[in-house]
Amino acid sequence: MKFYSLNNRKHTSNFENAVIRGLAPDKGLYFPEQIKKLPDSFFEDLANIDKVEMALTVIKPYTGDEIPVADLEDIINRSLDFEFPVVPINDRISVLELFHGPTMAFKDVGAGFMAGCLGYFVKKGNLGNVTVLVATSGDTGGAVAHGFLGVEGIDVVILYPKGKVSEVQEKQLTSLGKNITALEVDGTFDNCQAMVKKAFLDEEITGKRQLTSANSINLARWLPQMFYYFLAVKQLKGSAEPVFSVPSGNFGNICAGMMANAMGLPVAHFVAANNRNDTVVDYMQTGNYRSRKSVQTISNAMDVGDPSNFVRILEIFQKEFTALKNRFSAYSYDDDTTKNAIKEVYSEYGYLMDPHGAVGYLGLKEYLKKRPDQHGIFLETAHPVKFLETVEEVIGEKVPLPEEIKELMSKQKKSLQIKTYDDLKGFLLND
Ligand SMILES: *Cc1c(COP(=O)(O)O)cnc(C)c1O
């Protein structure tokens, strides 16, 4: 399939080049020329169909014949190699747990799928070696590092702000070795991101190394997120259409859900659950999109003031505001409300949510309040132990650490300390 730039419909690309580039040369996000409707028979059979075969049917229209089926199946197999259970909280609310992957955040699926695709394109030959350069505020770095670990022909360089990621997140970034290098930057996440942007424009570097990014606007990270929604509906075994509530930051995940819906997946409604970064809530109320500076919250992976993927949602609805409103709502919650939700759900139902999932829970509860005949699923995007301090403080109890985390914490941290752009440049030119 061809993909066009959302800045200019005439600027198109195949899947491979769109994945390698990330953004179109005109800086627009790529969007598929068609959204493929899947046949009724596929949905009638959804409960019985094998997970990998299901995912293959969903993604194949977009990858076309650019990745042979056997390789694509292999890529899917590796990126979906864990459980995605739907767990009931009460009789109207369930949670889709997306944290059973290697770094305990939902980004594992997208990162693994992208690593598989890029690995295939490199192996095929005409690309040469590639360096994935990425700045992280926490979760992205770990997922990307694990996804790309050991993929031949690809080096990964991750910049993270010293002292500003959680201990678990830091270990996930720095303990892998092999083709993964962690650069610990004496600065903020914004400094890291500015350095990465500068490197992409630096011809001395790009003349020597082929750079690519692995952020969430990349097609190969965005599209496989559709799988979650199919996997959830599959487990409902034909009961009524669910409402999905998605804790949202850059809006890639929820937008993938809306793509799944456009492909025919039965979904009653989508709720974007936000923290205090409420640009989209404001848009849905006023019809005016005003980006703003992000504010810091306890659900920090959603601290985004200008969500990049929202333009893709507008594109799905061809910018028809009423059609969008019928299918989509957005709510915002502050940190205190989020903490109370964690406490409430833990004491009433014995279920422990992380701060991101808690925002999702609140959004779903609010939407269902006025609709007594509907039921819904919120997405739990990270394991609560990734946000141990907040969660333990809120419930006033120690949370037992899973074995994987204990093992991770015993591993050795390896990072290179850097301060300035010249340090990064020196590393990229000389390594
Ligand atoms: C990245 C992230 C989100 C936000 O997802 P988007 O696709 O950017 O909206 C939510 N929760 C967690 C735990 C994340 O890591």
Image (cartoon, grey):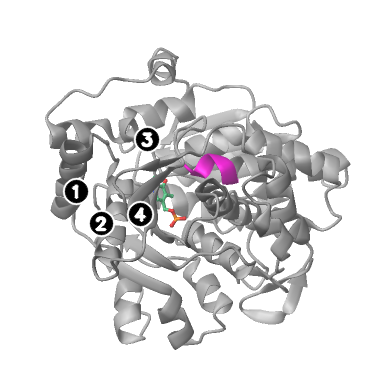
Q: How many angstroms separate mark 1 from mark 2 (CA)? A: 7 Å
4 or 1: mark nearer the eye = 1
Q: How many angstroms separate mark 1 from mark 3 (CA)? A: 16 Å
**Disc 1 + disc 2, Cβ < 8 Å:** yes
Q: Give, as a single range, the part of the protein colored magenta.
A: 106-110
Examine the rendering and report whether any part of residue 339 can be seen.
yes
Dot 2: within a 10 Å radius of its alpha carbon, few (fewer than 14), some, or many (20 or more) residues?
many
Nearer-the-camera pick, 150 or 66: 66
4 or 3: mark nearer the eye = 3
Query: Looking at the figure, which quarter contains the N terminus?
Result: bottom right
**Looking at the image, which residue is at 63% across and 22% down?**
178
Apparent side of residue 149 relative to residue 359 in the rendered image (left or right): right
Instruction: Check disc 4 and give the amino acid type.
Output: Met
- In the image, residue 109 above or below residue 194: above
Work out whether mark 1 precedes mark 2 in sequence or the reverse, and give the earlier one: 1
3 or 2: mark nearer the eye = 2
Instruction: Check disc 1 and give the amino acid type.
Output: Ala
Query: Looking at the figure, which quarter contains the C terminus?
Result: top right
Work out whether mark 3 precedes mark 2 in sequence or the reverse, and give the earlier one: 2
- In the image, residue 260 above or below residue 144: below
Q: Which residue is mark 3?
A: 383
Instruction: Check disc 3 and give the amino acid type.
Output: His
- In the image, residue 246 above or below residue 373: above
**Looking at the image, which residue is at 57% across and 77% down?**
315
Q: Which residue is mark 4?
A: 302
Nearer-the-camera pick, 371 or 290: 371
As helix, strand or loop, the secondary structure at mark 2 comes to helix
Label drawn at residue 50: none
